Amino acid sequence: MSPKRIPFIAGNWKMHLGLADAAKLAREIKDGVGAGDAEVALCVPYTALIVVAEILKGSPVRLGAQNLHWEPQGAFTGEIAAGQLADAGCRYVIVGHSERRRLFGETNAIVHKKLGAALGAGLSPILCVGETLEERESQKTWGVLAEQFRAAISGLPPVEAAKITAAYEPVWAIGTGKTASPGQAEEAHAFIRKLASQAHGDGFAAGLRILYGGSVKAENIDALMAQPDVDGALVGGESLKPISFLRIIHYTTPAAAARN
Ligand code: PEP
């Protein structure tokens, strides 16, 4: 990856963990993180935000949420606004995760509104894009990625777009144990970087962090991070296992090994 981009490893705890277990895991990550190369964030359930924020205070590990509503306030029972997340101590918020798109009907238009709301509240969104297996097998991958990415960032001023992290998450690799090969990930990341360049120029594209997500684990992180356009990982299942997640955070690449 480019030396200009700080690597980024984010955990997505999804709908897991009660308060006691959330606090325990956050403490284990905070204590084990050390001074690695990568920025680290934990995207935790809403109920755990305050407790985990308190634990992470003073540590380099950032807090994130997994979703938000696009309106700043109002009669939206059960929803959470961007400002409320910022208030709770969040730096990051995941937007457009495939589970939200697939199970909760989030369209590209909704993802675009959520992205704007997150940025408006000073949050840094992690924008997920990715194709299903059927789309990949019918050669629609590039069209799907282009549509999702362009719709999400359309009309955003470059200075706001620069606060976004992208995540390439092939739907067929999420929670399935099937990981994209390092070559497949690199090909998709390079394509997303090209889309970024078309949208806002080469400077924006060169600075855009693009994470890979989809069954990342201790055994495959090093090969993924060795790819020039892979800037980090969005990790689901393995982020709930402290030893595995810490190994992912402490990935090694040939470049890192040469420095040590
Ligand atoms: C995710 O939730 O974004 C994800 C990639 O999950 P998993 O690592 O479990 O595939």
Image (cartoon, rainbow, N blue to C red):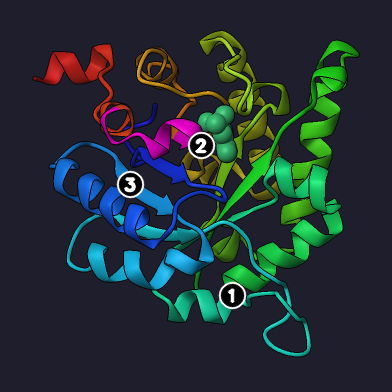
Is residue 14 rendered magenta in the image?
A: no
Q: Earlier in the sequence, mark 3 or mark 1?
A: 3
Q: Earlier in the sequence, mark 3 or mark 2?
A: 3
- Disc 2 residue lies near ligand 1 with CB under 8 A: yes
Q: Is residue 8 above or below residue 181?
A: below
Any mark on residue 40, and which?
A: 3
The residue segment tinted magenta is 233-243
Q: Amino acid at mark 2?
A: Gly
Is residue 234 rendered magenta in the image?
A: yes
Q: Amino acid at mark 3?
A: Val
Task: Indicate which quadrant contains ligand 1.
Answer: top right
Report the residue that reaches farthest toward the bottom.
74
Q: Nearer the viewer, residue 113 or 160?
A: 113
Q: Which residue is mark 1?
A: 82
Q: Earlier in the sequence, mark 1 or mark 2?
A: 1
Asked if residue 231 shows in the view, the reply is: no
Any mark on residue 114, and which?
A: none
Q: How many marks?
A: 3
Percent x, y for residue 49?
42, 67
Say few, some or many: other residues with alpha carbon within 10 Å of mark 1 (under 14 / 14 to 19 / 20 or more): many
Q: Which residue is mark 2?
A: 236
